[in-house]
Amino acid sequence: MTNFYDLNVHSAPECEDSPERLVSVAKRYGYAGIAITNHSNFWSEATGEDIISGIEIVVDKISDLKKNIRDYRSKVDVLLVHGGDPKINRAAVENSSVDILAHPSRYINQVLAKSAAENEVAIEFNLDELIYSRDVSRVRALSAFQTNLKLARKFGVLMVLTSGARSKYDLRAPREMIALAGLFGMSENEAIEALSKTPWNIILRNRKKMKQGYIMEGVELI
Amino acid sequence: MKNLPSSLRERKRYVAFEVLSAEKISRSELINEILASASSLLGDVGANLCNLWVLNFDGKRGVLRCAHDRVSMVRAALATINRVQGVRVGIHVLGTSGTVKKITETFMIQVDHTP
């Protein structure tokens, strides 16, 4: 069976539900685990069974981004950067310490897609925008997703599908996420990979780096 | 009026679902919300093609009827529902089947009614 992971979920103290509550709903929906990725101003370490510790760094200035990455990189398994601003998007995809550029909105172009592929920074498709917006704003969200998908395919950028849940009512089961991703042209196989293999590889990669004695890819102190 | 012979009826799929909600919601409120959400997402034309109807709903679990080739669209439409009459909800599809009998046996019989 495929192991599904949702890598963008917000919990208490930022939002109402506790990490345990969210993970129990997610497990019922068929996830193997979720990452608790509170925004950096609310961050506290979240641990527990099937909970992956994460963070979503929110900054206005690029210099703050670098400082935040230094502070948090060794503490979390998944590091997201709150995107949507052209300058922040660019800085995030150029930094290989970043795992995921969250909701980049429509500010992704061929230059950013190329650096994202080189630095193995995944682009997030945050389906929260399809669930909560209606009419014109949903059409805009779909069109941004469609463009990002096209660029990601062309340049081989990693993609992750997330719910961006802020409460247990916002979580959606993997099959529903796949159906939502189909609305902007993502194939079933791509969607499954964006919910299972890609998130798991990100988690593994970081856990390996945090192991004692790790120096760089292929070099380890024994 | 005579019923249509089975060869002339539309082909259907039945979708079992479960609603996670803060307060109890009624079947009619849920039907209205599902149709509204489908027509918002797929347009009136697309919503009609889905041939949607809620067969039964006990406040937690229910069965939905749809066109046999529109299941993924229906899943997407269900996923975009976040509130019913102001009550926060999340809808989760348990499974699909081609007959009412099978879906009831698989997903509805073991409903726990204890409060």
Image: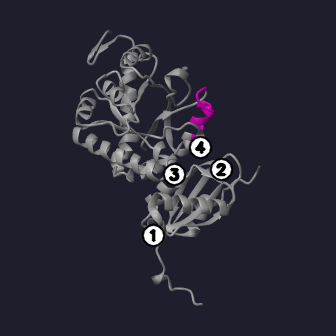
Q: Residue furthest front?
A: A136
Residue that carries the numbered disc 3 in the rendered image: B79
Pointer 2 and pointer 3: residues touching (CB < 8 Å)?
no
Q: Chain of mark 4?
A: A
- Residue type for callout 1: Leu
Highlighted magenta segment, given as a residue range: A13-25
Residue shown at 28% from the left, 40% from the top: A152
Label 2: state its secondary structure. loop
Left-right relation of A157 to B107: left
Residue for badge 4: A169
**Quadrant including the N terminus of chain B:** bottom right
The answer to whether residue B105 of the structure is visible from this angle is no
Depicted A114 relative to depicted B104: above or below = above
Of the two numbered discs 2 and 1 on the same chain, state the one appearing first in sequence: 1
Say which of A60 and A158 sits in front. Answer: A60
Which is nearer the eye, A86 or B11?
A86
Label 3 Cα crowd, 10 Å radius (few <14 / some 14-19 / many 20+) = many
User: Residue under circle 2?
Assistant: B86
**Which of the pair A90/B92 is nearer the observer?**
A90
Residue A30, compared with residue A202, is above or below; it is below
**Given this view, does label 2 or label 1 mark the residue nearer the observer?**
2
- Tell me, yes or no, whether the highlighted magenta stretch contains residue A107: no
- Say if mark 4 contacts mark 1, CB within 8 Å: no
Q: Point out residue A44 in the picture as x, y percentages from the top left corner.
A: 55, 20
